[in-house]
Amino acid sequence: MKTISDHILDILQNSVRAGATLIEIMVREEKSNDLYAVRIKDDGHGMTREKIQQATQPFFTTRTTRKVGLGLPLLKQNAEMSGGNLTIDSEPGKGTSVTAVFGYNHVDRPPMGDITGVLVLTIIGHDGIRFRYSHTTDEGEFEIDTDSLHEIFEDVPLRHPEVRGAINELIKTNLTAIGAST
Amino acid sequence: MNKITSLADLKKIKDQVQSKIKLRENSDVADTLVQIRVGMATCGIASGAKETMNFLIEETEHLAIDAVVTQTGCMGYCYAEPTIEVTLPGKEPMVFGHVDKVKAREIIDRYIIKGELVDGIIPASYKTIDEK
């Protein structure tokens, strides 16, 4: 994974597969504190304590199509390489929260990459799941909730080209406005 | 056009789009739609599945093909990522491997539009990805 947004796209799939109906993505940039934190929190079926420990092992996966599961191990590796860490909180039946902390200024911290594209693809790719995204920087905060999008667009599908373009622009403009690092 | 910065701006877009959308209201019927699913697990993302998906969305729109492009998990063909599954109306799903933009272009032009078979099909005896 070359960018943090790739990791987010990847870890989101875990939440989707865990049957989540609400997935929250929180990004916090604190340049002054040398911190770049990403949290993905879902209300999916959660994991037992034993499974949490296995989750960051490359040869653990819940899927049956293949025998390796590299999503979390790769994120952990990238976080640790930049002086940060990965923590997983989970409870069966309640949901899972994955937090990756990176060193903001560390040379090995991957760039954020195309987070706007990731969000748009995720939103239009998973009808019926509510996504909330919040991004905080030293300069401000941006939030978007698919519930308010559905409220606005009602029966107009979000994947409609013009709608998709508009959502894309909304996210991009606002992230630029709060000085989100790319 | 003004910049879109708030939800109020989105509301304006919605009103514009809604007037157009009425015309093709019936086009959402599943059996006339081309369904494309892009494998978007760790292996897919690392191989550029996101770019492939964006390309498929843009090109099917551009050519006015009634298609739904969605993402799915790993199909188990990690060696051949990015992989996509294309279901033409009334046909069995077909899985293609190593789908970069060039391959995606070929799949759209030859398989989706003309119904010809193209190289890169992963022969599989499954129905859909969902059961896995």
Image: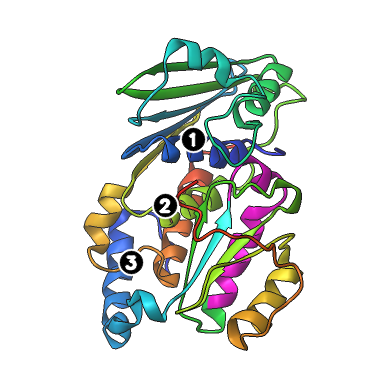
Are callouts 1 and 3 both on one chain? yes
> What is the three-letter code of the residue carrying label 3?
Pro
| Mark 1 → mark 3, Cα distance in angstroms | 25 Å
Which residue occupies 50% across, 46% down? B132
What residue is shown with label 1?
A14
Of circles 1 and 2, the one toward us is 1
Q: Earlier in the sequence, mark 3 or mark 2?
A: 2
- A89 vs B87: above or below: above
Q: Residues within 10 Å of mark 1 (few under 14, many from 20)?
A: some
Label 3 in the same subunit as label 2: yes
Whether residues under marks 1 and 2 lie with C-beta atoms below 8 angstroms apart, the answer is: no
Q: Quadrant of residue A153?
A: bottom left
SS of the residue at dot 1?
helix
User: Residue tagged by mark 2?
Assistant: A123
Element type at mark 3: loop
* Mark 1–mark 2 distance (CA, rounded to whole Å): 15 Å
Asked if the residue under mark 2 is in contact with the one under mark 3, i.e. CB atoms within 8 Å, the reply is: no
- Of B74 and A40, nearer the camera is B74
Q: As drawn, is A161 to the left or to the right of A5?
A: left
Q: Magenta span covers which residues?
A: B40-60
Subunit that carries the residue with mark 2 = A
- Quick check: A141 above or below B60? above
Badge 1: chain ID = A
Q: Secondary structure at mark 2?
A: helix
Q: Callout 3: residue from which chain? A: A
Q: Which residue is mark 3?
A: A157
Query: Residue sitting at 26 percent across and 50 percent down?
Result: A148
Nearer-N-terminus badge (1/2): 1
The mark found on residue A40 in the picture is none
Q: Nearer the viewer, residue B86 or A107?
A: B86
x, y percentage for residue A168? 47, 57
Residue drawn at point x = 27 percent, y = 76 percent: B18
